[in-house]
Image (cartoon, rainbow, N blue to C red):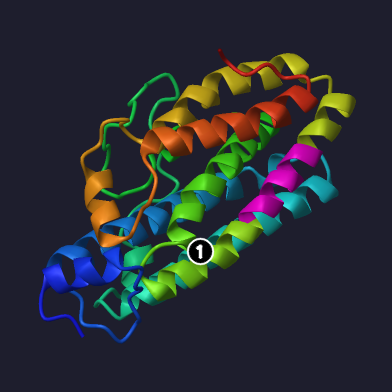
Amino acid sequence: MFRNEADLVAHVAAGGTIPVTADLPAGYRAELLRLMAGFVDSELAGAAGLADMINRAPGLRERRTAARIVSEKFGHAETVLGLMQRFGVNPQLYVRSHCWTARFDRHMDFGNRRIGTDKRLNVFHYPVEGWVDVLVLTLLMGCAAAPQLGELAGCSYEPLAAAMGEVAEREAVHVQLAGKALEQGLAELDCAASARASVAYWYPRVVDTFGRIDSDRVDLYRRYGLRRRSNAELLRQWDATVRPHLEALGLPAPV
């Protein structure tokens, strides 16, 4: 379909998309796999961290909520690993290739520097401390998923775009579930102080998931049609979305 990378770039610039049957130039293929691996690793690490906390939820309703989110995150990873399989990735070996529950010391701060051997977002290198902490992280990251997954849902690679559209819908439900559980916790568990501390801790670490504002890689993603907007634009959308959620719960967002 494409004689070379220039053909693909011209096709994308004209509004074209890339079907699953297309032979992909090496550069496009490499960046596509990078994006998919980052998503899969983040879902596996995020689900693994939350799975460890299920039995620390205060009641059966909350444990069911946590178990649902964990199950769906593993499902998201499975879906995208299925797409990666046609590029030679063995899903079973991939899942066993890293310790997804591994975390660094909570007091460390890696910013947006790449840490570790997998490609998870750095926010999933930090451990959670208790049920309220889990809910705050889930709420903040769920809101962050909206602009980030929205980019992938509109990307040029048709199979990934279709998969991310469905994932984005479920992630929006995760935000609702976390927000409701946090609201109930604030009313029933007298945990306002710990919730405020969790927001102060996780907010800047979620900011870091949007990457460097001056990242050169975004320009490459745009050229391939894998991204449209800058990191700064996505960050602004998240900030404008998450603040009303926090305000409704009586939790101040950092200035």
Name the chief secondary structure element in magenta: helix
**Camera sees residue 211:** yes
Q: Nearer the viewer, residue 43 or 230?
A: 230
76 above or below 246? below
Quarter of the image for the N terminus: give it.
bottom left
* In the foreground, 83 or 19: 19
Q: Residue at x 77, y 18 (%)?
A: 192
Q: Secondary structure at mark 1?
A: helix
Q: How busy is the neighbourhood of tag 1: few (under 14 within 10 Å), some, or many (20 plus)?
A: many
Instruction: Tell me which residue sits at (16%, 73%) in the image.
Output: 7
Q: Is residue 77 magenta?
A: no
Give the quadrant of residue 12: bottom left
Q: Which residues are magenta?
A: 171-180
In this picture, residue 57 sits left or right of residue 32: right
Number of numbered discs: 1
From this viewpoint, is residue 78 visible? no
For residue 241, above or below residue 191: below
161 sits left or right of 110 in the view: right
Name the spot of residue 109 as percent of width and height, x first: 37, 22
The residue tagged 1 is 164
Q: Is residue 253 left or right of residue 179?
A: left
